[in-house]
Image (tube, helix red, strand yellow):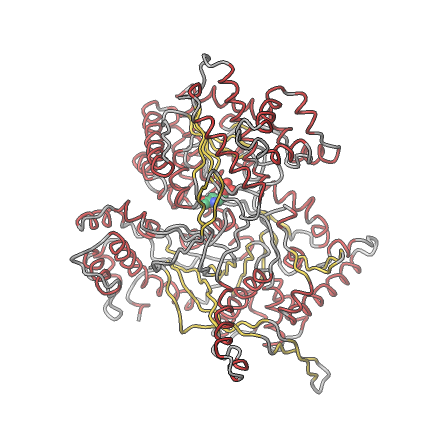
Amino acid sequence: MDDKHHQNSIGGREACLCDRTLEKDIQRHMRFTMGRDPAKPNRHACFMGLAYSVRDRLMDRWFHTQRSQYDTLAKRVYFLSLEFLPGRFLMNYLISLKMVDEARRTVEKMGFDLDELEEEEWDAGLGNGGLGRLASCYMDSLACLDFPGYGYGIRYDYGIFHQTMENGWQREQCDNWARKGTPWEIRRGEFLIPVRFYGHTETRTDANGRQYYRWVDGEVVMAMACDILVPGYGDGFVTNMRLWRAQSSREFNLDEFNQGDYIGAVEAKVLSENISGVLYPSDEMEQGRELRLKQQYFFVAATLADIMRRFKKLNRNFSELPDFVAIQLNDTHPAIAIPELMRLLMDGEGMAWDDAWPVCEKTFAYTNHTILPEALETWPVDLIRRLLPRHMEIIFEINRRFLNEVRTRQPSDSSLPGRVSLITDSGQQRVRMSHLAIVGSHTVNGVAELHSKIIREDLFRDFDTVFPGRLANVTNGITPRRWLAQANPLLARLINETIGPEWITDLDRLRELEPLADDAAFRRRWMETKRDNKKRLARYVLRKIGLGIDPDTLFSVQVKRIHEYKRQLLNVLHVITRFHRIKAAPGLPVVPRTTIFAGKAAPAYHQAKLIIRLVNAVAEKINNDPDIQGKLRVLFLPNYCVSQAEKIIPAADLSEQISTAGMEASGTGNMKMSLNGALTIGTLDGANVEIMEEVGRENIFIFGLTAGQVTTLRNGGYHPGTYYDGDAELKQALDSISRGDFSPEDPHLFAPVVDSLLHQGDYYMLLADYRDYLTAQESVDNAFQDKEEWARKSILNTARMGKFSSDRSVREYADRIWELKPLPAVELGEESLG
Ligand SMILES: *Cc1c(COP(=O)(O)O)cnc(C)c1O
């Protein structure tokens, strides 16, 4: 939007405080917001000035959006997630306001470069990986599609740790992302919601014999709202994420104060603010710490209070709540919302159980993100009882009623109640949060067809019988705004020049590129763009780790959290075999390759950290071997995060998506790379299956066991030793690791890696898939040598990614789960601004 339009659209009565020009705005913010003499601007001040100026331009649109939601009594969706991974905001805001060129010109005039200013911004890393990034893509699509809704989460002081390398080992540094202040959040210091912990419940019986419950005493912590704007694309729609920050309450531990322990009281106050201190850094792994449960309840309680406050303004009966409110639980992390809503409806609003429960069921829906057993949350009953005594009572009552119903409906299956119970009892009683989430929701969805099938037929099969139709699928998606328009401006420009820019909000339009796959001139421009992106990445790699890489080699990319099921180690075995082949026949021609790894390991996940150490050791040896020069390079880029992904993904030729079939629920990295013209080498896992269906079997490299074969093999007795004995190259690769070829100073360093495969059962079946993976990699080499054919496949990959837009995913949620309609087009006219 240009400034003139902006001025016109605001009208007279609520005049925008923006000056006429962006330049004046930036200067004003430098001067009055940053307190910096505009005669002596520096890069950071200019970044902040620009950031505040773009935020200003969204503010009135945001008020307007909020008012339209209120005025039209629109049903709203509340997306509850313990993680959001937005990355940087500046370009996202500029693109949505269509102000990139104007901003570039303006800051240039002031002596700065927009790309350098962009680098001033710290990523908002308030999530671990895929799950948090998905939440951010969905926020983007909600706004783009004019769906009334909000994201709710925690405003952590410290996001996902900053990863550095020390002698090849991962080191974690704390991510003080907002240290220099963040221009994006709007802190509402006056808007505080009390959240209780501990204490006990009191009951009272009225004249009619009805029991009333009250949760009293304990500690109260205040939740302070911090809003971050989320703009749609181009039009006026702007929504927000509301992230809660813990603040001590004023009356906190007054007793101690009265007894004269003033410092003790203040210390306790400070401790209570730890709740929003730090994001738990483990992906696909629950740690079961008390503070984690506190975080979950803290943000859920504040969010539900906010939802109720907004609902009460409508003056409706609480039985109508599901007509106005849909709540999506992003994994089980916010599942405590179910007993919390029951508590609010019964203890707060006086509803009877039988009236409150259907309201709950109709309001909630739950998304399952993983079938890994170590990631499924359970909490000890004792812990919940101590921290949230009223909720534990409610959970027991939900379970009692649910199991009664199960017994009535399926009396013949006597072990069914035990299998579906919300409580497990193997020594210690624990609450299964997934069962709570399923019982309290009207719809439960998996995140790719295969994953949803596994949920229905395996993980939650009993619930598919108890609640027919409750288990559904919504395949994940990614936002084309960030993952093509923003991350890959060169490709976006080429596409715009060829088919116009409509794909940005309608990704299926990329299909119009299909015929151009047969156009030699277009193929050349396509591959030139890829090469420019590879050069850009090469410069970044040189700057970051001092290693030169050749943009004319095949860039094979595996970037994602480091986890055994994702099998970075299989990729390493392939690289080692390549190395051995070159060493054995240095004269033979090879297809030169650069293998790129990046990703964080959970700080307590020792095997994953050892794999990082191994990648670095293998890289060190290979990159310094004169026989290998020009044929193979390996590197590990430290600190994978959203802004780094934006640099790596446009440069990928080959996307490594090689998890053990059945274990990756969906994946979204696979979609990002394919959208940017990389070809996938992958197993039939998660969304890879659907990517294959879309791009065509001939445009993807599929290998390995299927999910069904993995199960069969595991049940039939899997013997990794047979593969080792029967495959000389595999044996050589493993032996070279155990011998210490990559760690001469400490030959046994990597013994645990080999042990996990040969002596601990190779749970993720790397050895079973090794040979087929190598064969597939040979097909990749052959395909890459035919430049024209590769370019064709690359174009077709991009052209056929329409399905994987998060716009499609969010529409499916809205239609099938939330029963939500877009707001009528938001007109930024004077009339409703009064
Ligand atoms: C997309 C993304 C992920 C998820 O990658 P997968 O390959 O699906 O595991 C993780 N981290 C970041 C920073 C991402 O952008």
* Residue drawn at x 53%, y 32% as measured from the top left: 692
- Residue that extends furthest to the left in the rendered view of this protein: 39
The answer to which of 754 and 65 lies nearer the viewer is: 754
Taking 711 as reference, is 181 above or below it?
Answer: below
Q: Is residue 659 left or right of residue 494?
A: right
* Residue drawn at x 76%, y 61% as measured from the top left: 403
Taking 416 as reference, is 338 above or below it?
Answer: below
- Residue that extends furthest to the bottom in the rendered view of this protein: 207
The answer to which of 163 and 830 lies nearer the viewer is: 163
Q: In this rendering, does residue 713 appear at all?
A: yes
Give the percent coordinates (x, y) of residue 434. 64, 55
- Residue that extends furthest to the top in the rendered view of this protein: 587
Quarter in which the C terminus is drawn: bottom left
- Residue that extends furthest to the front in the rendered view of this protein: 745
Give the percent coordinates (x, y) of residue 391. 64, 68
Give the percent coordinates (x, y) of residue 707. 65, 36
Image quadrant of residue 5?
bottom left
Q: Is residue 664 left or right of residue 18?
A: right
Taking 661 as reference, is 373 above or below it?
Answer: below
Q: In this rendering, does residue 668 appear at all?
A: no
Image quadrant of residue 143?
bottom left
The answer to which of 546 and 322 lies nearer the viewer is: 546
